[in-house]
Image (tube, rainbow, N blue to C red):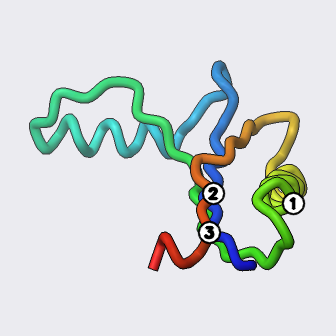
Amino acid sequence: MKFHATILIELKEGILDPQGRAVEGVLKGLGYAVEQVRVGRVLEMELEAESEAQAKETALAIAGALANPVMEVYTLEALKPLQEVL
């Protein structure tokens, strides 16, 4: 069975986010009232797994391998059977 997973990797609270600050500056320059913009990475992937539990375990293992545990945290934002996504 195929699953679609969405994983968010972002900097931990307290870690300086220069890219987020740059985006915040641009948005404020455009007149938007925004504060504390944080920039992260979103991973969208299709996984082959026998069950939803196995797909979740695999997605979290991949996120753990791609995130820097010193500076970043990750969350599994969504996991759905692929036919529900299409």
Looking at marks 3 and 1 on the same chain, the residue that comes earlier in the sequence is marked by 1
Quarter of the image with the N terminus in it: bottom right
Residue identified by numbered label 3: 81
Residue shown at the point (57%, 36%) measured from the top left: 17
Left or right relative to 65: residue 16: left
Residue shown at the point (72%, 42%) measured from the top left: 74
- The local secondary structure at tag 3 comes to strand
Amino acid on which the number 2 mark rests in the picture? Leu
Nearer mark to the viewer, of 2 and 3: 3
Task: Estimate the x, y position of residue 67 in percent, counting from the top left.
Answer: 80, 50
Amino acid on which the number 1 mark rests in the picture? Gln
Looking at marks 1 and 2 on the same chain, the residue that comes earlier in the sequence is marked by 1
Amino acid on which the number 3 mark rests in the picture? Pro
| Depth order, front residue of 23/63 | 63
- The local secondary structure at tag 2 comes to strand
Residue shown at the point (68%, 42%) measured from the top left: 75
Left or right relative to 19: residue 61: right
Task: Estimate the x, y position of residue 26 in percent, counting from the top left.
Answer: 26, 45
| C-alpha span from label 2 to label 3 | 7 Å
| Depth order, front residue of 62/2 | 2
Task: Estimate the x, y position of residue 25 in percent, counting from the top left.
Answer: 30, 37
Left or right relative to 32: residue 75: right
| C-alpha span from label 1 to label 2 | 11 Å
Residue identified by numbered label 2: 79
| Depth order, front residue of 84/60 | 84
Residue identified by numbered label 1: 54
Quarter of the image with the C terminus in it: bottom left
Rendered position, 52 above or below 9 = below
Residues at marks 1 and 2 touching, judged by CB atoms closer than 8 Å: no
